[in-house]
Image: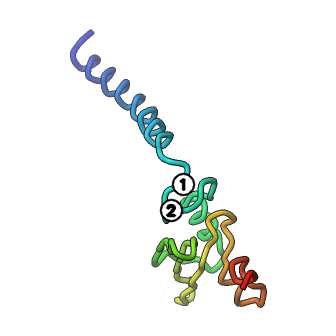
């Protein structure tokens, strides 16, 4: 085997081993990290894909994790230049701000 083929084989094997290492690292994390989204939540990328599907979506302006409320605060710009602010429940992907604004209190507010 020539040296180029050997290098390609090594690179291929190293690349195949990387995902296994990444999965092992994630598996070693505790079930719940303080202040982090709950285990079993939607991934941030799943939430972003949903927002990008909004008919008025232009671009994401800001994303923040509010560990006190347990919500993603996401701000995006609309095609007409407007600004939309959302408070997304990581478990459901739904906008809690819309529920509050429409008169349907979010679960955390119903208990009060």
Q: How is the image coloured?
A: rainbow
Q: How many marks?
A: 2
Look at the picture and state if 40 lies above or below 98. Answer: above
Of residue 21 and residue 82, the one placed in the foreground of this image is 21
User: Residue 18 location in percent, x, y?
Assistant: 39, 34
Pointer 1 with pointer 2, Cβ within 8 A: yes
Instruction: Name the residue at 62% across, 58% down.
Output: 41
- SS for tag 1? loop
Instruction: Name the residue at 55% across, 72% down.
Output: 72
Foreground: disc 1 or disc 2: 1
Is disc 1 surrounded by few (<14), some (14 to 19) or many (20+) residues within 10 Å?
A: few
Q: Which residue is mark 1?
A: 32
Q: Residue 8's quadrant in the figure?
A: top left
Of residue 94 and residue 34, the one placed in the foreground of this image is 34
Look at the picture and state if 39 lies above or below 97. Answer: above
Q: Residue 25's quadrant in the figure?
A: top left
User: Residue 26 location in percent, x, y?
Assistant: 47, 43
Name the residue furthest top. 1
Name the residue furthest left. 3
Residue 1 horizontal side relative to residue 82, left or right: left
Q: Which residue is mark 2?
A: 36
Q: Which of the image's four quarters has the N terminus? A: top left
How far, Cα to Cα, is label 1 from label 2?
A: 7 Å
Name the residue furthest front. 112
Instruction: Name the residue at 61% across, 73% down.
Output: 88
Instruction: Name the residue at 46% across, 77% down.
Output: 62
């Amino acid at each position: 085997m020539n040296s180029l083929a050997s290098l390609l084989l090594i690179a291929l094997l190293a690349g195949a081993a990387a995902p296994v290492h990444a999965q092992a690292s994630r598996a070693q994390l505790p079930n719940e990290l303080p202040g982090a989204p709950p285990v079993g939540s939607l991934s941030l990328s799943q939430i972003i894909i949903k927002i990008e599907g909004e008919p008025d979506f232009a671009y994401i302006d800001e994303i923040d994790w509010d560990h006190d409320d347990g919500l993603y605060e996401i701000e995006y710009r609309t095609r007409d230049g407007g600004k939309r602010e959302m408070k997304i429940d990581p478990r459901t992907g739904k906008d809690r701000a819309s529920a509050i604004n429409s008169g349907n209190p979010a679960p955390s507010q119903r208990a009060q």
